[in-house]
Image (tube, rainbow, N blue to C red):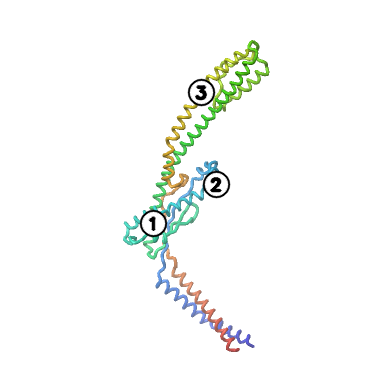
């Protein structure tokens, strides 16, 4: 019997549809009034278009795994490079410059501190190649001014740093060229030293042979095989073969040729050392400029591609009138539902 009375009360509450309408309308009116009595802050946004030169990054694929710090693969490297943009845009240097420019534009900003500005702004990855800058303030015009000035100041700083990093990249190419050339010279020096060492062994062997007899066939084959090592097109130094002895000649002739070849090799070794000294000197000369460029660029890579600042600033209230009105109507519906639940519960208690 009790359950039937509670059910009847529930059906009666539902049938009173006009109460539902009243709660919804009242809630919507409250939300509508709040939107005017408590103005919503305005969000201003602007886009920063920045990408990465994939071709140049792919050319660095052989270098990236050698890094002691930062990502060790191409995808992570690209993400790290792009994150550097956001880090620089939000540095104290850029923010302080932005506030200084804003104070010149409008007295509104005279009492704004760096901490206040940080609370009002944000930057996040919006889409492929796009960082979105955001400023939220009670004054919509000031929010738009803030994000536009921040974008202009940051874009200018990024342009400056990328220009410096391109200088560093140019110096890096020169250093790489010097390093590569030094490597070739070192290879030539190693070959010359090896030849001189091996030729000393041959001199010793020839000295132990019969000086009046032609070389044995197996020795001729062995010395010819040895000479071929230094007579290849890919070798950075080739042994002089103009006066190389004929097969029927005896040991003294071979011995004389080796001494002449050693003289040529020693001269080449001295010149090789001079060449390497010059290359290292030239390389060391530009190293300070290279390291200074790296410091001045704040680690920003020349692989970044910063597009011209063509962004259009958009503004919108955080809480729109429509949203608050609909939210109030929904709360009104919830309030009606709670009212019905309480009335049904009270009816059950009265029956007890």
Secondary element type, mark 1: helix
Secondary element type, mark 3: helix
Instruction: Mark yes or no: residue 78 visible.
Output: yes
The residue mark sitting in front, 2 or 3, is 3
Residue 94, position as x, y percentages in the image: 39, 53
The residue mark sitting in front, 1 or 3, is 3
Residue 55, position as x, y percentages in the image: 51, 43
Residue ID for mark 1: 148
Q: Earlier in the sequence, mark 2 or mark 3?
A: 2
Instruction: Mark yes or no: residue 44 visible.
Output: no
Q: Earlier in the sequence, mark 1 or mark 3?
A: 1
User: The C terminus appears in which quarter of the rendering?
Assistant: bottom right
Please tell me whether residue 28 is drawn above or below residue 168 in the rendered image: below
Q: Is residue 261 left or right of residue 222?
A: left
Q: Quick one: 20 or 263, which is closer to the camera? A: 263
- Badge 3 density bin: few <14, some 14–19, many ≥20, Cα 10 Å: some
Query: What's the residue at 55%, 17% (across, down)?
Result: 260
Query: What's the residue at 51%, 23% (across, down)?
Result: 268
Using the numbered discs, state the Cα–Cα distance from disc 1 to disc 3 in whole angstroms: 65 Å
- Badge 1 density bin: few <14, some 14–19, many ≥20, Cα 10 Å: many
Residue 317, position as x, y percentages in the image: 42, 65
The residue mark sitting in front, 1 or 2, is 2
Q: Quick one: 175 or 156, which is closer to the camera? A: 175
Residue ID for mark 2: 72
Query: What's the residue at 57%, 15% (across, down)?
Result: 256
Using the numbered discs, state the Cα–Cα distance from disc 1 to disc 2 in whole angstroms: 36 Å
Check residue 268 in the rendering and tell me which mark sits there, or answer none.
Answer: 3
């Amino acid at each position: 019997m009790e359950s039937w009375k509670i059910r009847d009360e529930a059906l009666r509450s539902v049938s009173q549809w006009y109460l539902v309408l009243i709660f919804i309308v009242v809630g919507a009116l409250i939300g509508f009034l709040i939107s005017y009595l408590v103005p919503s802050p305005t969000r201003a946004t602007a886009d920063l278009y920045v990408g990465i030169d994939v071709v140049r990054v792919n050319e660095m694929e052989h270098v990236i795994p050698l890094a002691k710090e930062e990502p060790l693969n191409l995808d992570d490297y690209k993400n790290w490079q792009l994150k550097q943009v956001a880090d620089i845009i939000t540095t104290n240097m850029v923010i302080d410059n932005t506030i200084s420019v804003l104070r010149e534009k409008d007295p509104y900003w005279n009492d704004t501190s760096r901490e206040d500005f940080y609370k009002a702004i944000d930057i996040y990855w919006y889409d492929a190649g796009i960082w979105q800058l955001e400023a939220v303030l009670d004054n919509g015009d000031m929010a738009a001014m803030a994000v536009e000035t921040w974008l202009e100041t940051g874009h200018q700083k990024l342009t400056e740093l990328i220009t410096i990093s391109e200088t560093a990249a140019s110096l890096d190419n020169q250093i790489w060229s010097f390093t590569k050339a030094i490597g070739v010279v070192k290879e030539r020096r190693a070959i010359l030293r090896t030849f001189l060492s091996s030729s000393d062994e041959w001199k010793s062997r020839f000295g132990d042979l019969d000086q009046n007899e032609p070389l044995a066939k197996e020795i001729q084959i062995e010395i010819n095989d040895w000479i071929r090592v230094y007579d290849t097109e890919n070798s950075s130094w080739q042994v002089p073969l103009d006066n190389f002895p004929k097969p029927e000649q005896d040991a003294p002739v071979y011995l004389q040729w080796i001494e002449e070849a050693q003289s040529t090799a020693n001269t080449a070794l001295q010149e090789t050392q001079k060449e390497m000294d010059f290359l290292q000197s030239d390389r060391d000369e530009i190293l300070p400029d290279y390291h200074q460029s790296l410091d001045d660029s704040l680690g920003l890579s020349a692989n970044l591609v910063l597009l011209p600042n063509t962004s259009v600033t958009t503004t919108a209230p955080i809480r729109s009138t429509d949203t608050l009105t609909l939210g109030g109507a929904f709360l009104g519906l919830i309030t009606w539902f709670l009212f019905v639940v309480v009335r049904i519960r009270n009816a059950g208690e009265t029956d007890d």
